[in-house]
Image (spheres, coloured by chain):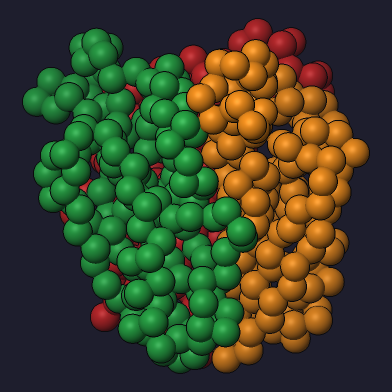
Chain colours: A green, B orange, C red
Amino acid sequence: MKHYRKELWFETKQRRQLINITSIVQECLRESMVMEGLLLCNAMHITASVFINDDEPGLHNDFELWLEKLAPEKPHSQYRHNGYEDNADAHLKRTIMGREVVVAITAGKLDLGPWEQIFYGEFDGMRKKRVLVKIIGE
Amino acid sequence: MKHYRKELWFETKQRRQLINITSIVQECLRESMVMEGLLLCNAMHITASVFINDDEPGLHNDFELWLEKLAPEKPHSQYRHNGYEDNADAHLKRTIMGREVVVAITAGKLDLGPWEQIFYGEFDGMRKKRVLVKIIGE
Amino acid sequence: MKHYRKELWFETKQRRQLINITSIVQECLRESMVMEGLLLCNAMHITASVFINDDEPGLHNDFELWLEKLAPEKPHSQYRHNGYEDNADAHLKRTIMGREVVVAITAGKLDLGPWEQIFYGEFDGMRKKRVLVKIIGE
């Protein structure tokens, strides 16, 4: 069994931002030399997400408005977690979007559907945060 | 390490529909000859879901009403993604339900709890769409 | 390839309760002797969750209020699943929180970010329920 591990670092300019990381993850897969197996990609921080969806700016705007409706950032005082922190909403938003994706590896490629793209979802950004890529297979 | 891959195709009669795919996934596992390992089952489309829950029609009705409350289909104009498309709500609904499940394989069987059943959740149907089953193990 | 399986049993005192199971899962990993691989940890019941977030009581209180807002328990009659049962809300709450986590194993340790902790999320407790830990690797 082969195994591979890499940390990806991100520092967004905005508090909330979605970054398409598909090509970076593909590069990890190439480095791993794994042809058949599973790839785990997860946020290492609990106010961020790795998820799969469409790379379409209108949809990303819809996500922003929708997440703000389901788990609004303000007023910060509505959450008990806030005080020293102001990011309770980011914990909730990431819960909806999910921590991780597991992607099949087939014939040395990410086995994705036609519109599937992997995103890093930042909900409490403007500081350095990490994503983990772990691959096992042969 | 053994590995196995299969695409399952679905075309629902309704826009939104839940299909119990547990027995199909079990058949994949039998074909794979894997006795111990992990099974990934994911929607290959970004307006559909694979999830695990109860096969109970009342609950499925509750899911329909609940998802329509959290991410209503209409008016289509409320979403920027819509225009050429009308399925922004399906992207959001699938986000809540999840893209994928990972199931343990033990002694050649899906290692599921007593009421766990695997479902394909379609939120923008009436056309052919795919689910991926990937198995690794020995 | 090595593989390992263990069931963890929980019986909460309250209907809804979050339990930090990180150290129990780490003990499973030690028993497995796996140094590199993937660990799946999933609820075996469809009204419970395994998820990763912060071990902070204020945040856990926020989760309780937030889940009650998105999928309120009462009135029980609002859900068709209820009748013989009264736990439809628990199925919905667990859907938001997620069924499972997949965690990388690196150098014999859970490869978690600095604040990542694994929780059992019970939403219909006061009876014995199970969590599955499955590990594959080498």
Q: Is residue C10 visible?
A: no
Examine the rendered structure and indicate whether residue A76 appears above or below residue C39: above
User: What residue is at 22 percent from the left and 25 percent from the top?
Assistant: A81
Could you tell whether C13 is left or right of B129 in the image?
left
Left or right for C133, reference B36: left
In this orientation, which residue lies closer to the viewer: B70 or C62?
B70
**Residue C102 locus on image (x, y percent):** 45, 61
A100 in relation to C31, above or below: above
| Residue A59 appears in the rendering | yes
Q: Quadrant of the N terminus of chain B?
A: bottom right
Q: Position of residue C57 (x, y in %)?
A: 26, 30
Residue located 32% across and 53% down the image: A43
Q: How many marks?
A: 0
Residue C102 relative to residue A17: left or right: right
The image shows residue C35 at horizontal and vertical percentages of 34, 83
Instruction: Judge whether A95 appears above or below A107 on screen.
Output: above
Q: In the image as oriented, which residue stretches furthest toward the left?
A: A84
Among all residues in the image, which is located at the extreme right? B13
Q: Nearer the viewer, residue A105 or C3?
A: A105
- Seen in the picture, residue B59 relative to B76 is either above or below; the reply is below
The percent position of residue A5, horizontal first and vertical second, equals 30, 76
Lateral position of residue B11 relative to residue B82, left or right: right
Q: Residue at x 81, y 79 (%)?
A: B30
Residue under the image location 50 percent in, 63 percent down: A102
Task: Tell me which corner region of the image, top left, top right, bottom left or bottom right, holds residue A87.
Answer: top left
